[in-house]
Image: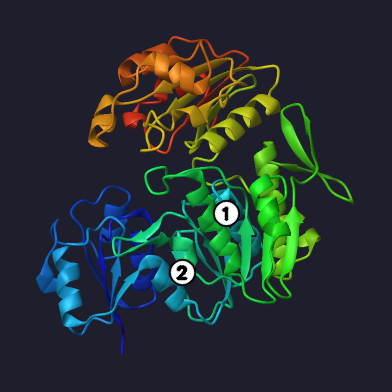
Amino acid sequence: MSKKYHFIAIGGAVMHNLALSMAEKGFTVTGSDDEIYEPSRTRLEKAGILPEAKGWFPEKISPDLDAIILGMHARQDNPELIKAQELGVPVYSFPEFIYEQSQEKIRVVISGSHGKTSITSMVLHVLNAQDLDFDYLVGAQIEGFDLMVRLSTDAPMIIIEGDEYLTSPLDRRPKFFHYQHDILLMSGIAWDHFNVFPTFENYCEQFEKLVDMTPPAGTFIYCQEDSIVKQLGENCKISNVNLVPYKAHPYTIRDGKTYLITPENEIEIPIFGEHNLQNLQGALEICGSLGLSDAQFYASITSFKGAAKRQETMASSETSVLYRDFAHAPSKLKATVNAVKNQFPDRKLVAVQELHTYSSLNKDFISNYAHTFDAADEAIVYLNPKAVSLKKLELMDAQTLREGFQKEDLLVFTDINLLKTHLEAKEYAQTNLLLMSSGNYDDMDLSILKQKINQKI
């Protein structure tokens, strides 16, 4: 008999992908949400599982449901959740549900403050190119994959991007505790989610606990170029654990192109930056632990173009590129700015950061951004006063931001139209433009900028 699942807060990025995956499997899927944005709305509608009306409807909850999947966006007093609890319907957060559906599989969890999505995407790309059967959970839309989640009956393994953010309104622990990994990769630790983990020590503690969850004879792949992760790897006392330290894959840059240096030859790859070469080596180690040879990995990685909004090329010419990147936390910002500058040392770099997250808009956290913009020739910060007030924070002035970033010539904009005018007035010969944010720059129209940078894509 077909199982019946109801999703509370079905509109979220991962939640709607999980709902689509379950519907694709032939299960009966229903859901609710108080707001559903694109692309979730159209995708749910196409699958026939878009809620008829916005809001919460306790009457949708019946005893014949096999489970409720609870999204992070829902609150503890959600009327549908209360009804499910009263009726005794099993309630899962999505990480608990992922584990429940993959207990018989080899579970690979990719963790760390940065690089998770890129490493996961690389692994998925290689496994796909090698025609292997696998399930996955990844935090961004990637080329060649319709969904961000796949849960099949037969796949022998699942590749999971392991997020340290909170599990659900009922469970304030990090999501990655629930997956019970067999193979764990940790890329690096740099304080993030300041609103949830109030101190850096508390934040690090979550990763330490995760390492301790590695089973005897499990595998821990860790980046030895991160001092905290290196320590976790070297201090790991789990019996028979397979410890695999890694660092950036050897590479060289010639004429704005990056080449992997392998024992046999040099291989051109589309991605670049020291942090991405670390990510690539991590992906190589995971694929090796799943039985693939280095030769298989190299053959497949050459066609990997990157995950969405990770150094994504929006426009390009012979002398300039417009990049869009998800970078928002300090470590990600610094790595991305350095990567673009090192790839094109002879070009001017105009780097723009939208402060969008709770941490980045908080004046008690802003000093963590010190020197992240040092490699940029022109550094710009944009913040929307409305976003600041919605988070009940105080709007920082330009001087506070300049001190936080330790950059006296930092330009600060609080009006998207003024930023757009400023960027469109520039000439981009021998100049790259890098737009970084986990937000969307208030849907700023990029068409004139693309035109100026001689769009070819």
Q: Residue at x 38, y 38 (%)?
A: 357
Q: Is residue 222 left or right of residue 12?
A: right
Residue 81 pos. (x, y %): 20, 69
* Image marks 1 and 2: residues in contact by CB distance under 8 Å: no
Q: Residues within 10 Å of mark 2 (few under 14, many from 20)?
A: many
Relative placement, left or right, of 139 versus 287 is left
Q: Residue at x 68, y 68 (%)?
A: 219
Q: Residues within 10 Å of mark 1 (few under 14, many from 20)?
A: many
Looking at the picture, how far across and down is residue 210, in whole percent?
55, 63
Against 39, is 420 above or below? above
Give the CA distance from mark 1 to mark 2: 21 Å
- The residue sitting at 20% across, 51% down in the picture is 35
SS of the residue under disc 2: helix
In the rendered view, does 48 fall on the left or right side of 285? left
Which residue is labeled 1 in the image? 121
Mark 1, secondary structure of its residue: helix
Q: Is 406 situated above or below 328?
A: above
Instruction: Return the residue at label 2.
Output: 178
Q: Nearer the viewer, mark 1 or mark 2?
A: 2
Q: Looking at the picture, which amino acid does disc 1 mark?
A: Ser
If the image is split into quadrants, where does the N terminus sit? Answer: bottom left
Residue lying farthest bottom?
1
